[in-house]
Image (tube, helix red, strand yellow):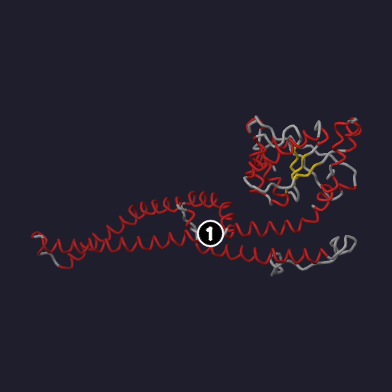
Amino acid sequence: MKKHGQRFASHFKLKKVNSPFLKNLAIIDTPGMLDSITERDRGYNYQDVIGDLAQIADLVLVLFDPHKAGTVREAHTSLRDTLPAKTFEDRVLYVLNRIDECASMTDLLRVYGTLCWNLSQITGRKDIPMIHLTYSTAAAEKSGRAEDPQAAYLHHLENQREDLKKAVLQAPCHRLDNLASFVETHGERLCHFLEGMISYRKKARMFRVKSFFTGLAASMVCGAAGWLGLMGLTPFAGLDPVLQITGAGMLSTIILIFWLALVQKYLYSRFLKKWLRQLDSLTPLPNQTRRDSWASIRDLLYVNLKNSNGLYSLSQVLSEHATVKQIHERGSREIREALKELAGISSEDDAWSGRRAGQVPYWAAAEPETTE
């Protein structure tokens, strides 16, 4: 969080509450989304902060109130771009809060319909996510709203606060599952990123080999033409054949050096620009999973190739790809197996509290150091 600057850190306030409900929970309340404010006015990049927090959260609650049912600009950006890129859909719950503030059942239906329409436009999906309807019964009774005849519709609605409470309480239990999903998703994306680098480097190496032999052939042709020219020209016809061949060889060498120093660099720059334009052709994208993975790393690969000029060690990338692939396959499997074991263990068991030693993951095992 420090990367977002001091002005962002100054907005944080810690509040401790002595409640059994919060024993294993940390709740982060983000600022409300506004319509006219800009990122510069906030002093930090709001969407980047939301994305970083959503990435580490086990559960994200998106709350709407009846007065602004998802119509603000920042809500559109967060729900359409930021949250889908940083977290998973099953971790996001949509809540229409304070429904007791609606004047009547008709008013509530209007607000609910507006929110459904806005979510369908924001997410670009025909099937909108479930929207939980909640209100505080204590607050409604305190304000006298519960006794208002216009609020009689509240008795016909299910207050889904308990369902949300259960979802929040179960969030820590999903931590391992979220960790496994994180390893699987980011491991797959990192493998895909390295695949793109490997594919480009192989193509670049093949291009350099072809370019070198093309330059070599051109230099040899020019050297042979120079030798024939020396033999055909009257002033040089009487020269020793060894000198003629030496002159032709020097001409051939100069042309090859010129090719490698200038022509090949120019051709390689065009080759790089060509593949930066058609970056999607580097790796096969046969299904939607691969296309989603590619969409998340494509810009990163573009920047990496452009900044490095496509010059990096292929052997090192191959080694890193093998390591990441192994962690991706075995690491997520070990977490899933541990999750199945924990599912059958009660919270009172010693193993739940971490007193029973488990198997050390293979990547954490290290040989003991020896000193002479």
**Viewed as shown, does residue 359 lie left or right of 324?**
right
Residue identifier under label 1: 285
Work out which quarter of the rendered image holds the C terminus and state it. bottom right
* Residue 370 shows in this picture: no
* Residue 27 shows in this picture: yes
**Viewed as shown, does residue 148 lie left or right of 284?**
right
Residue 173, image x and y in percent?
80, 56
Q: Residues within 10 Å of mark 1 (few under 14, many from 20)?
A: some
Residue depicted at 74% across the width and 32% down the height: 67
**Mark 1 belongs to which amino acid?**
Leu
Give residue 149's quadrant in the image: top right
Q: Secondary structure at mark 1?
A: loop
Residue 89, image x and y in percent?
69, 51
Vertical order, 226 against 129 (above or below): below
**Viewed as shown, does residue 243 lie left or right of 19?**
left
Work out which quarter of the rendered image holds the N terminus and state it. top right
Residue 341, image x and y in percent?
80, 66
Residue depicted at 65% across the width and 57% down the height: 185
In this rendered view, identify the residue nearer to me: 301 or 225.
301
Residue depicted at 66% across the width and 33% down the height: 43
